[in-house]
Amino acid sequence: MPELNFDGHNTLYATHGLHAYAAKCPPQLVRYGLRYYSKLGETVMDPMAGSGTTLVEARLLGRNVIGYDIDPLARLIAQLKSRVVTSLEIDVAYEMVNRPFNRFILRRPEDTPAAALGAEKSSLSTMDFRKA
């Protein structure tokens, strides 16, 4: 019989820590069941998806997923946790979030307009929050 005691194990990896949903199943237990009772490429259906632990683990193991839940909050959490996000979507979101802040990027004090006018130098160092 496999060891199914998850005390001390990290249960917040991937998107599992997104929300502290009550009665959340340990993802390691779900992963165990999925490895033994489903195959790569198969579809896993969870009729009581809750916070989406089964949906996330199934996606991580290369399964297709379908989840249902009567609770609107549970549906929202499960949808957000199990959604596949592409690199392009991440890059676009990053640019959307950072665009308004680009004008607030701190530069070297000697490069500021105040320094050019002979104002006293600041002790601020270079801080650039843009994507490298």
Image: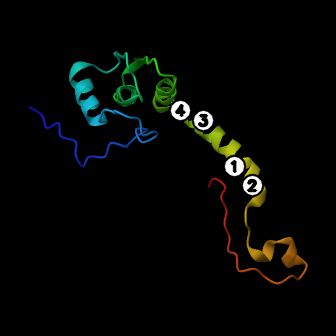
- The C terminus lies in quadrant: bottom right
Ranked by sequence position, the earlier of labels 3 and 2 is 3
Q: Secondary structure at mark 1?
A: helix
Label 3 or label 1, whichever lies nearer to me, is 1
- Estimate the spatial distance between the alpha carbons at disc 4 and disc 3, rounded to whole Å: 8 Å
Q: Give amino acid for label 3.
A: Leu
- Estimate the spatial distance between the alpha carbons at disc 1 and disc 4, rounded to whole Å: 19 Å
Q: Which residue is mark 3?
A: 88
Residue extending farthest left? 1
- Estimate the spatial distance between the alpha carbons at disc 1 and disc 2, rounded to whole Å: 6 Å
Residue at 40% x, 26% y is 50
Q: Secondary structure at mark 3?
A: helix
Residue nearer the viewer, 35 or 21: 21
Q: Give amino acid for label 4.
A: Val
Q: Which residue is mark 4?
A: 85
Relative to 62, say whether 11 is above or below.
Answer: below
Q: Which residue is mark 2?
A: 102
- Estimate the spatial distance between the alpha carbons at disc 3 and disc 1, rounded to whole Å: 15 Å
Q: Badge 4, how many Cα within 10 Å: few under 14, some, many 20+?
A: few
Q: Is residue 3 left or right of residue 81?
A: left
Find residue 98 and name its label.
1
